[in-house]
Image (cartoon, helix red, strand yellow):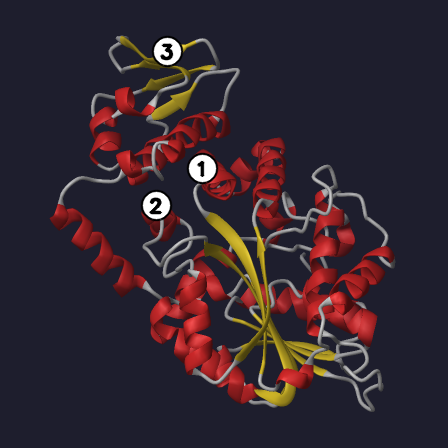
Amino acid sequence: MLRQLIREGRLVLTDHDGKVYEYGPGGGETIAARLTDKGAAMHIAKDPRMGAGEAYTEGRLVIEAPHDIRDFVLFVMGQANRLGGGSVLKPKGALRRKFDQLLYKWEQNKRDRASANVVHHYGLTREFYELFLDVDRQYSMAFYREPGNSLERAQIDKKALIAAKLRLGPKPDGSPDTRPLRVLDIGCGWGGMGLFYNKHYGCEVLGVSLAPDQVKFANERAEALGVADKVKFQLIDYRDVQGPFDRISSVGMFEHVGARHYDEYFAKCNELLADDGIMLTHTIGRKGAPGGDDPWSRKYIFPGHHLPAMSEMVGAMERTRWEVADVEVLRYHYAYTLEEWYKRVKLHEKEIVELYDERFFRMWQFYLVGAEQSFRGAGMVNFQIQSVKRRDAVPMTRDYIIHEAARLSASEETPEWHLDPKFKVAAE
């Protein structure tokens, strides 16, 4: 496998018994790795997509200084992607591939599993997420107007872009709304989007999530800001929400719906939205045809998730009476976001190991860099799809998006990243 894979630079691999193997022509980057026990090589070889991450997490695969696991993954997977999407790393055998397909379909978020799947990831401690997210705790793609922007600035620009696409200000004809718009934020995270809508437009917001501590923390933030009467967060499945709402946003939640539930999801959202309303769906997606998902991430990080193809989303929207008003494909933004998260995780290795253990720290490293390489060259992108029930709900051109996003962004100062006690409201 490695002889097929390493076509640039050099990989030096030392087995558990001290025997050294070298792969690649040299002349470029050289990365050294070591296997610590007799069974590690076979564990990786029988299914590299699972085995490499498991071996690194368990300390069976060690990357030698001065490089780390990010260097290793980007080096190996960059070459795998150039060889044809990493097919050399997939397990062999029709039976194994069929099993993977059946497992992938079975694991997608059924209603009775949805809460447990969400808590598996989002139920980690507040202190942990604070160690690498921006100060507003945005746990989705940041929008890098310039590659050198800080994560904090890029997350502000992301919120500004989404809010602009929701058109929370005047109506398309320029007339003001006579009452505050009512906004539903599905998968509200720690409340940052909902609070942003209220701050800039005075909206009444309901955020919903299946992660108990996220909901608790978001309500604490609203209370501390004095807007708890306008911005509320509930621990509830979106399928149990009662409408109507003027706007619906879904940021980083659609990945957890599961392909076989797409029609159900968009039908419920259609029911919840006012006739002249707007919905904005922001999700990770795949640039090509529908397919399966990374099995390592499915097992260890996001059980039940599915990353949609555009055709899967739009097909479900068509079947549930939506009209697509605007589509934007965002390509490299999440790669920059994940790179910054990785740097901050590495910076706080000691604190993360104290919160959990070394195994968890290595698992999180592998998750972040695996995701980063997917956005750098393996076919992952972000979609933002604006959908309406009536085509006159938005202006004829999308100029309003550009102008309003710029206005919102300019109105927000860029905070510095630090562990500010005010973002630990009632944490003690």
| Amino acid, disc 2 | Trp
How packed mark 1 is, by other alpha carbons closer than 10 Å (few <14, some 14-19, many 20 or more), is: many
| SS under mark 1 | helix
- The residue that appears at 84% across and 85% down in the rendered structure is 176
Tag shown at residue 296: 2
Q: Spot the residue most to the front.
A: 396
Residue 49 locus on image (x, y percent): 31, 39
Looking at the image, is mark 2 or mark 1 earlier in the sequence?
Answer: 2
Looking at the image, is mark 1 or mark 3 earlier in the sequence?
Answer: 3
Q: How many labels does the image show?
A: 3
- The residue that appears at 79% across and 67% down in the rendered structure is 224
Tag shown at residue 366: 1
Report whether residue 220 is seen: no
Residue 354 locus on image (x, y percent): 54, 38
Front tag of 1 and 3:
3
Q: In this view, does 261 lie to the left or right of 365?
A: left
Q: In which quarter of the image is residue 180?
A: bottom right
Q: In this view, does 178 lie to the left or right of 370?
A: right
Looking at the image, is mark 2 or mark 3 earlier in the sequence?
Answer: 3
Tag shown at residue 25: 3
Residue 190 locus on image (x, y percent): 64, 62
| Amino acid, disc 1 | Phe
- Compare residues 35 and 243 and report the one nearer the observer: 243
- Compare residues 255 and 300 and report the one nearer the observer: 255
- The residue that appears at 40% across and 32% down in the rendered structure is 82
Q: Mark 1 and mark 2 in contact (Cβ < 8 Å)?
A: yes
Q: Quadrant of residue 417?
A: top right
Residue 29 locus on image (x, y percent): 48, 15
